[in-house]
Image (cartoon, rainbow, N blue to C red):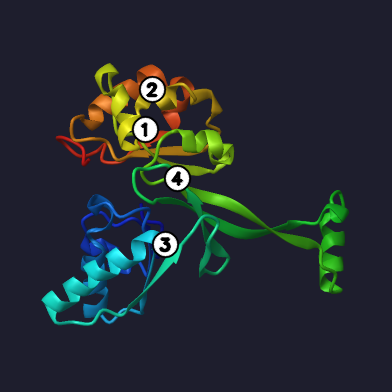
Amino acid sequence: MHPPGLAFDVGRGEARLAGAADLFLSHGHLDHCLGVPFVLSHRTLHESKPTRVFCPAPVVEALSDLIAAAERLERVTYDFTIEGLSEEGRVGVGTDLTVEAFATSHVVPSLGYCLRRRRRRLADAYHGLPSGEIARLRAEGAEVSVEFEEPWIAYCGDTTVELLDRRPELYRVPILIVECTFLGEGMKGRGRRYGHVHLDDLAERAELFENEVVVLNHLSRRHRTSDLRRRVEERLGGLAERVVIVGESSRGRADG
């Protein structure tokens, strides 16, 4: 997932990710991190500003080795830094934007990320005053507003649904990106076994989602996006109209 200027995971690598100066990796499985050298190569070729790579702290050494091998293959030195994060680690990513890490539940060390934004609102003491009076006070130098921080986008990476049980605040983030890997009765056991979410896990919690948009990704290649959409409409009730499925507009099987 790729908000402007940063990427949450990079998959196997795409040229369009060359615009991301900050890469946040959820874990070390290759379908999430193999593209890191590809992105660094493109950014170095185009003399972009240095790239910052963030990942779970236990992943740093192996990921550094992967990048170093790519540098040797290309006989190029990439312009980047790599930093390991732990739960609640915070990184500034631009004016008024911060990424905060949170622990997830997968079969390898893993993190999710929440993009938070700082905003301003009228201080409580000035509520109810006419706009002209507020403008006068502001012109006289009074601080009539207060700064606050709010979650904007949460990316859960690969995880079991128990993450949502532990962190119910994720149900209220405006944009929630959560995986849905498996569908169907026969695949129920695989979610917990392999650290993934089954659609039935979401259906059991459908009434809890207050998010403006819920983005489902990471569908197994065993299923089609059309299968997922059908099950979403059948099982998620009113939540279905707020669900976006990654890859839904493409034909054939979804990426796993």
- Give the alpha-carbon distance from disc 2 to disc 1, as whole Å: 8 Å
The one nearer the camera, 120 or 25, is: 25
Q: Nearer the viewer, mark 4 or mark 3?
A: 3
Mark in the foreground, 1 or 4: 4
- Local crowd size for mark 2, using a 10 Å CA cut-off: few (<14), some (14–19), many (≥20): some
Disc 3 target residue: 57
Secondary structure at numbered mark 1: loop
Alpha carbon distance from label 1 to label 4 = 12 Å
Question: To which quarter of the image does residue 254 belong?
Answer: top left
- Residue at 58% across / 65% down in the picture? 96
Sequence-wise, which precedes: disc 3 or disc 1?
3
Badge count: 4
Residue at 42 percent of width and 42 percent of height: 105
Tag 1: residue type?
Val
Height in image: 71 above or below 201? below
Q: How far across and down, in percent of the image, does residue 128 sit?
A: 86, 48
Mark 4 and 2 residues: CB-CB less than 8 Å, in contact? no
Is residue 64 visible in the rendered image? The answer is yes
Q: Which mark is residue 104?
A: 4
Left or right: residue 235 versus residue 222 is: right
Q: Which residue is mark 2?
A: 200
How far apart are the two marked residues, 3 and 2, measured between alpha carbons? 32 Å
Q: Nearer the viewer, mark 3 or mark 1?
A: 3
Q: Residue 80 appears in which quarter of the rendering?
A: bottom left
Q: Residue at x 53, y 50 (%)?
A: 152
| Amino acid residing under circle 3 | Ala
Q: Pick whichever of labels 4 and 3 is earlier in the sequence.
A: 3
Amino acid residing under circle 2: Asp
Q: Residue at x 47, y 34 (%)?
A: 162
Kindly identify which residue carries mark 1: 197
